[in-house]
Amino acid sequence: MTPTLLLVDDDPAILDLVGRFAKGVGFDPVACDGGAAALGYLGTRRADVALVDLRMPDVDGLDVVRAIRDTDPACQVVLMSGAATIDSAVEAARLGAVDYLTKPFDFPRLRALLGTIRDETARRRRVLAIEQDAVRTVEFQGMVGRTARMQHLFSLIKRLAPHVRTVLVTGETGVGKELVAHALHACGPRPRGRFVAVNCSAVTETLFESQFFGHVKGAFTGAVDTAAGVFESADRGTLFLDEVGELPPSGQAKLLRVLETGEVRRVGASTSRQVNVHVVAATNRDLRSEVHAGRFRADLFYRLTVAEIDVPPLRDRREDIPYLTAAFVRQFAPRIGKTLVGTTPGAECRLVEAPWLGNVRELRNVIERACILAMGEFVTERELAGLDGTGTAVVPRHPDAAATATRAADAASLAALERQHIVRVLQRTGGNKMSAARILGMSRRALYRRLERYGISTD
C-alpha cells in the first residue's frame, strides 16, 4: 500500500511543491491548508507521516503535533518552519517529532527522510505479515506458544490424550485451561464425542445430584420430566469440570464414586446406568493446600491427578505475546470489518511489558477493544491507553507506587507458587533432578539455583 503523507501549511505554493515532490518519492499526499483543516482530517482518517508548518494563523503547528500524538501515535511527524528557534525544536522533539526542517527546503535531505520513513513503514508491514504466518506454525488446537514451556505443554497433551481417563489442569484464571481440555478431547480417542462443560462454582449443593446424574419424572418438586445429567450427556465423550475446587464436600464424595465405578443413578431411579466418560477437571486453586486444610477430599484429589497439566501464566512466557496479539488481530479484524495489519512497535512494547494479571483472557479482551477503536491499519498506543470500567488504564504506561507494591506482592506469591511446583515435580520424579529439570523446562544448573534459593532439600 502507498503510504499517506499529510501536508499541513497555510501557503498553497508549499502544499503544491511538497505534494508533487512527495508523490515522486512514493507517497500519497493529502493537503490541508491550515491547522484547523488538519484537525478535521485527523478526526476521521490517519496518515503514515505528517509534514506540519510551525506558524499558521488558525491553529499553531505544535497544537497539530499534539493532536497527532493523541489521535495517532503511529504517525511520524516532521515539523517545518521558515523561522526555526531552539525552543520550538526542543518542544517538537518532546512531542515526538522525528525531525525539524527549515525553509527553504533542503530537498536531498527531505528525500532521504521520507525514504527512511517509507522503508520503515514497509518493513513493519513485512514483519507483521511474517508474524501472522509464524502464528500458524506455533498454534496447537487453538493455543499459541513458541516458548519452551508451551511447546512442552503441547507435547504433554499429545502424549496423554490417547490414554488417560482423568486429568487435572491447573493454572491461574485466564491462562486457557478450557482450551487445554478441548485439546485433550480433540487429540484423544473420541474426538467425535460430545464435549460437555460444567462450571462447578455455579452448582448448588441441593441440585448437584440432579445436574450431574439426572432425575426421573416426579423425583422432587419441579421434576416435571425425566432428564439426563451431565455425565450421561457426555457419555463416550469428554466432561470438563471447571473450578472443580469449588464443589461442596457432599458433591466431592459423589463425584469420586462415579469416577471409581463409572456408574450414575438418576435421582428417584432404582437402577444405575454405566457411562464411559473422560473427565478433565480444572482449578485455579492449590488443591494440595485445600486437601491439607480439609476443604477438598484427598481421595478425590489423587483420583483426579492421575495426570496433571500446569498451564503457565502469561507473564512467564512474554515471548509469546506478539504471536498471541497477531492471532487475536487476525481473529477480530474480519469480524469488525477492518483490514488491520497488526500493532505499531510502541504498542507492541507496551503489550509485552504489561503485567497481565488476567493472563491470556485479559490480553484477548484488550486486543478486541483496541481493534474496535483502531482507525488505520495498525493498533497503536492510543488504543491501549483507554479506560476500563474501574477508571484504570488498560495497559498502564507509567506504574505508580501502588502498582509497584502490587507487583512486589505478586512476585512474592509467584515465588511461593514456583517453590510448590518444583517440590511437586521432584516428588513425581522421586527426587531425580535431571528428570525434574527436563519437566520444568530449565537447565539442571538453574534448578540447583532455585533449590538453593527456596531452601528445598532433596535428601
Image (tube, grey):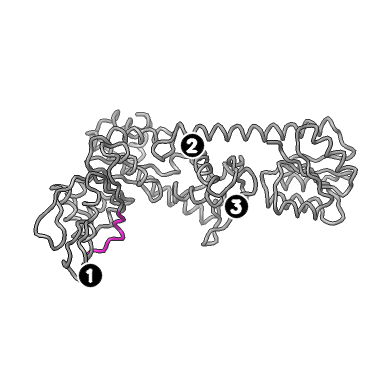
Q: Which mark, by number, is residue 222? A: 1
Task: Tell me the kind of residue under disc 3.
Answer: Leu
The residue tagged with tag 1: helix, strand or loop?
loop
State yes or no: discs 3 and 2 in contact (Cβ < 8 Å). no
Q: Which numbered disc flags the more N-terminal residue, 3 or 2?
A: 2
Q: Is residue 110 above or below residue 178?
A: above
Residue at image coords 54%, 54%: 394
Mark 3, secondary structure of its residue: helix
Asked whether residue 279 is in view, the answer is: yes
Image position, residue 100 (x, y; %)? 80, 41
Q: Amino acid at mark 1?
A: Gly
* Residue 319, label in figure: 2
Q: Earlier in the sequence, mark 1 or mark 3?
A: 1
Q: Nearer the viewer, residue 299 or 266?
A: 266
Judge left or right: residue 173 versus residue 14. left
- Residue 405 lies, in percent from the top left, at 48, 54
Image quadrant containing the C terminus: top left
151, above or below 246, in the image: above
Which residue is found at the position 44% from the left and 46% from the top? 360
